[in-house]
Image (cartoon, grey):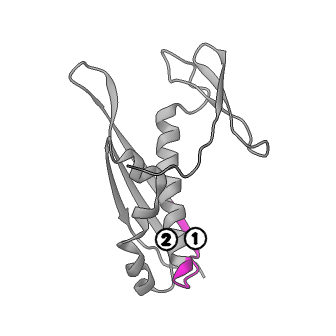
Amino acid sequence: MSKPAGEFQIGLERLDAYEFEVQFDKPQYERILLDEPAPLGRDQAPNASRILAAAVGNCLSASLLFCLKKAGVEAGGLRTDVQVQLVRNENNRLRIGSVDVTLHPSVPDGAALAGCLSTFEDFCVVTQSVRAGLEVRVKVEPEPEKG
């Protein structure tokens, strides 16, 4: 059984058609808009699937940077690509089939990066949570530091 460690709440308010405004739990966080692609919505903002992809990519990126920092390595930069595959289930309903994340850190020392590769994913709250329901594959492809 999991032990509670905290909670937060966000609010969504419908503005028009399928467009919603998301209000976060802290006043310093900007509100964001969500919308569905056509033909349902007007495609004026990202939809929930894209926000999920951003959350997975961001969480993995932050986890890798944290691990590198603990190892004494300052990453010169980090670019993350997230690819989502949409599939149809047996009832022809659209679902997220898988998420592929490729992280491109700029690091001066590959040895420190190698030490993080076996652990950083385990500390990503979002990725480890969604893995219970869908496949998330992760690759790390270092890039040379820009100097």
Can you give x and y, in whole percent of width and height, for residue 10 in the image?
A: 64, 34
Name the amino acid type tagged 2.
Pro
Can you tell which quarter of the image residue 114 is in? bottom left
Can you give x and y, in whole percent of width and height, for residue 76 in the image?
A: 59, 76
The residue depicted at 66 percent of the width and 29 percent of the height is 11
| Label 1 SS | strand
Label 2, residues with CA under 10 Å away: few <14, some 14-19, many ≥20: many
What quarter of the picture does the C terminus occupy? bottom right
Residue furthest to the right in view is 27
Ranked by sequence position, the earlier of labels 1 and 2 is: 1
Task: From the viewer's perspective, tell me whether residue 92 is left or right of residue 45.
Answer: left
Q: Is residue 47 above or below residue 53?
A: above
The residue that label 2 is drawn on is: 105
| Label 2 SS | strand
Name the amino acid type tagged 1.
Gly
The residue that label 1 is drawn on is: 77
Q: How many marks?
A: 2
Q: Are marks 1 and 2 in contact (CB under 8 Å)?
A: yes
Q: Nearer the viewer, residue 95 or 122?
A: 122
Q: Which residues are magenta?
A: 69-79
Task: From the viewer's perspective, tell me whether residue 11 is left or right of residue 128.
Answer: right
Q: Is residue 116 above or below residue 6?
A: below
Q: Is residue 3 above or below residue 142?
A: above
Q: Is residue 108 above or below residue 40?
A: below
Query: How much space separates mark 1 and mark 2, taking CA atoms?
Result: 6 Å
Can you give x and y, in whole percent of width and height, for residue 44 in the image?
A: 61, 26
The residue depicted at 63 percent of the width and 23 percent of the height is 20
Task: From the viewer's perspective, tell me whether residue 36 is left or right of residue 102.
Answer: right
The residue depicted at 60 percent of the width and 30 percent of the height is 45
